[in-house]
């Protein structure tokens, strides 16, 4: 972990001593990066104890639950409180139905309450007096771009072509005047994303999730999943790099990003420079439909296994009820710490590197006492990281019942005997449905334009990821992009005959 600690020290020093880092030219940045890297490596003591927290070493210290997060069950009371505190009841005339013809935008416009959004985004000292542009207008502009124009740049979006006086639908949705030439500049949106605190981002997400859970898109039986995807930025070559004990420390133009391994893709490199987005999804067990709930953004060089407890604790701080998580082999709870701290069970496909204990069926996961036993044993419990099994034979069924121990203990591992044994009923279905976790990433990247980040810094990228998740949930709730099921005449006749 010393190389992670060194990287943390270098990043902190660069941010502290060079607050105007973004304005420096590339040549100056190279000189500074090499200088700081040499200073830290020369003074670093590898025998010292690492004082930094795990959150800091992983680069997510600004994404941990803090005071101020509103839980899902508290959001209804918060909405009622905001609505009841309005002293003046304004005219109920709504111009949206006249100008907003797009069904999807009309649904989103009717769902959002500007008063609640402004309250969620209010900061210390915030005053609405003498304002032409409110936080709700900027939030709506971000949603408009993510939902309808994900492929264009922010600079192009904030132009007459998309927000001019003749684009009445867009202006009404954002909340701009139809009689004044008030415009939103791309620098305003940039500042809006950069100034969004993590608590504000989460509260906005909880506000949308409150309506999402009421929309009926989820059935009674749901399971949660965790997966990750890479988000590459335009930093291709490091400003400075150094090998330390077999580990490479790199400093890029974007100080927070790093280089990590990419999953095998035919048309892309095996390495990615940028970030990795770890997302908790909810999956309807009956339909298989999956939706993004909340995410963490880290530099791309950190392994997925580090982020499972942080993501679960963040979701619980939001009031999301989690009981079972299905994930790939990278996310595991071998030592049982996640179960003890959060009460959440994690199941992953058996790791191929873990040896299967003797007298265990590799196909079904059935456990037998020894080589001569033919009757599968029954799972009793899992205590102290050990599974207990008892004889599954009925009375008089086994002739060896009087001479065998009739019990067996198997320690927890990352293979067939995780917190939930592989032989448990329906656990294979949970592993199979895990593949649906990848669907929200396709929506985030292709439906809301997250494939191209278009922003700099980890903080701004995290804000954009949150806004993209909100946009995906709103699109799903609107339901205007669902494919209509068409039945051919041949299918219709077959159905009629079956009836």
Image: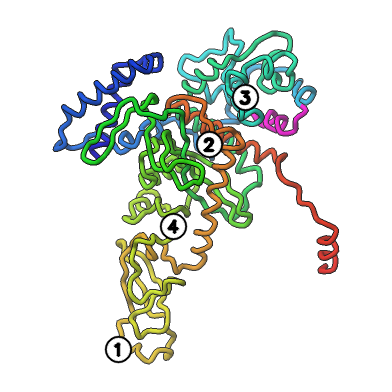
- Mark 1 residue element: loop
- Circles 2 and 4: CB atoms closer than 8 Å: no
Residue drawn at point x = 38 percent, y = 67 percent: 381
Q: Which residue is mark 2?
A: 74
Which residue sits at x=33%, y=52%? Answer: 337
Select label 1 or label 3 by which is in front.
Answer: 3
| Prevailing SS of the magenta stretch | helix
Q: Which residues are magenta?
A: 101-115
- The numbered disc on residue 165 is none
Q: Using the image, determine if residue 138 lies above or below residue 337.
A: above
The disc placed on residue 140 is 3
Camera-nearest label, 4 or 1: 4
- For label 1, the residue is 403
| Dot 4 alpha-carbon crowd within 10 angstroms: few under 14, some 14 to 19, many 20 or more | many
Mark toward the viewer: 2 or 3: 3
The earlier-in-sequence mark between 1 and 3 is 3
How far is mark 2 from mark 3, CA to CA? 24 Å
Quick one: label 2 or label 3, which is nearer the N terminus? 2
Q: Are marks 2 and 1 in contact (CB under 8 Å)?
A: no
Q: Are marks 4 and 1 in contact (CB under 8 Å)?
A: no
Q: Residue at x 67, y 17 (%)?
A: 163
Local secondary structure at mark 4: strand
Residue count near mark 2 (Cα–Cα under 10 Å), binned few <14, some 14–19, many ≥20: some
**Dot 1 alpha-carbon crowd within 10 angstroms: few under 14, some 14 to 19, many 20 or more:** few
Give the mark nearest the N terminus, 3 or 4. 3
């Amino acid at each position: 972990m010393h190389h992670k600690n060194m990287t943390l020290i270098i990043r902190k020093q660069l941010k502290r001593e060079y607050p105007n880092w973004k304005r420096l030219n590339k040549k100056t940045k190279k000189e500074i990066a090499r200088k700081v890297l040499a200073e830290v490596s020369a003074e670093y003591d590898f025998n010292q104890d690492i004082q930094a927290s795990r959150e800091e070493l992983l680069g997510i210290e600004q994404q941990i639950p803090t005071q101020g997060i509103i839980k899902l069950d508290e959001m209804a009371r918060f909405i009622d409180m905001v609505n009841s505190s309005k002293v003046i009841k304004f005219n109920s005339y709504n111009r949206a139905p006249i100008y907003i013809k797009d069904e999807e935008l009309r649904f989103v416009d009717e769902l959002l309450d500007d008063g609640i959004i402004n309250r969620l985004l209010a900061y210390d000292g915030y005053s609405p007096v003498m304002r032409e542009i409110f936080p709700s207008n900027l939030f709506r502009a971000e949603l408009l771009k993510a939902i309808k124009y994900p492929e264009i740049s922010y600079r192009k979006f904030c132009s007459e072509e998309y927000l001019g006086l003749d684009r009445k639908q867009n202006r009404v949705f954002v909340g701009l005047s139809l009689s004044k030439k008030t415009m939103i500049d791309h620098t305003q949106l940039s500042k809006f994303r950069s100034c969004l605190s993590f608590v504000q981002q989460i509260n906005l997400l909880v506000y949308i999730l409150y309506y999402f859970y009421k929309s009926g898109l989820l059935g009674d039986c749901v399971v949660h999943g965790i997966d990750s995807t890479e988000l590459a930025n335009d930093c291709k070559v490091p400003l400075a790099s150094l090998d330390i004990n077999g580990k490479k420390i790199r400093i890029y133009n974007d100080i927070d990003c790093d280089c990590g391994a990419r999953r095998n893709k035919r048309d892309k490199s095996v390495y990615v420079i940028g970030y990795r987005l770890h997302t908790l999804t909810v999956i309807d067990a009956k339909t298989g439909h999956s939706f993004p709930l909340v995410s963490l953004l880290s530099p791309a060089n950190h392994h997925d296994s580090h982020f499972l407890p942080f993501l679960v604790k963040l979701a619980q701080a939001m009031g999301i009820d989690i009981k079972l998580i299905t994930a790939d082999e990278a996310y595991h709870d071998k030592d049982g710490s996640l179960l003890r701290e959060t009460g959440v069970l994690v199941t992953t496909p058996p790791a191929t590197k873990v040896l299967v204990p003797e007298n265990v069926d590799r196909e079904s996961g059935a456990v037998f006492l020894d080589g001569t036993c033919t009757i599968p044993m029954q799972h009793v419990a899992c205590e102290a990281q050990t599974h207990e099994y008892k004889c599954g034979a009925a009375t008089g069924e086994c002739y060896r019942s009087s001479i065998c121990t009739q019990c067996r203990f198997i320690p927890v591992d990352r293979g067939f005997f995780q917190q939930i044994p592989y032989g448990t009923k329906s656990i294979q279905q949970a592993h199979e449905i895990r593949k649906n976790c990848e669907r929200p990433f396709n929506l985030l990247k292709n439906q809301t334009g997250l494939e191209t980040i278009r922003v700099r810094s980890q903080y701004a990228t995290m804000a954009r990821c949150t806004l993209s998740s909100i946009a995906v949930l709103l699109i799903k709730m609107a339901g205007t992009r669902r494919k209509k099921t068409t039945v051919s005449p041949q299918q219709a006749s077959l159905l009629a005959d079956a009836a």
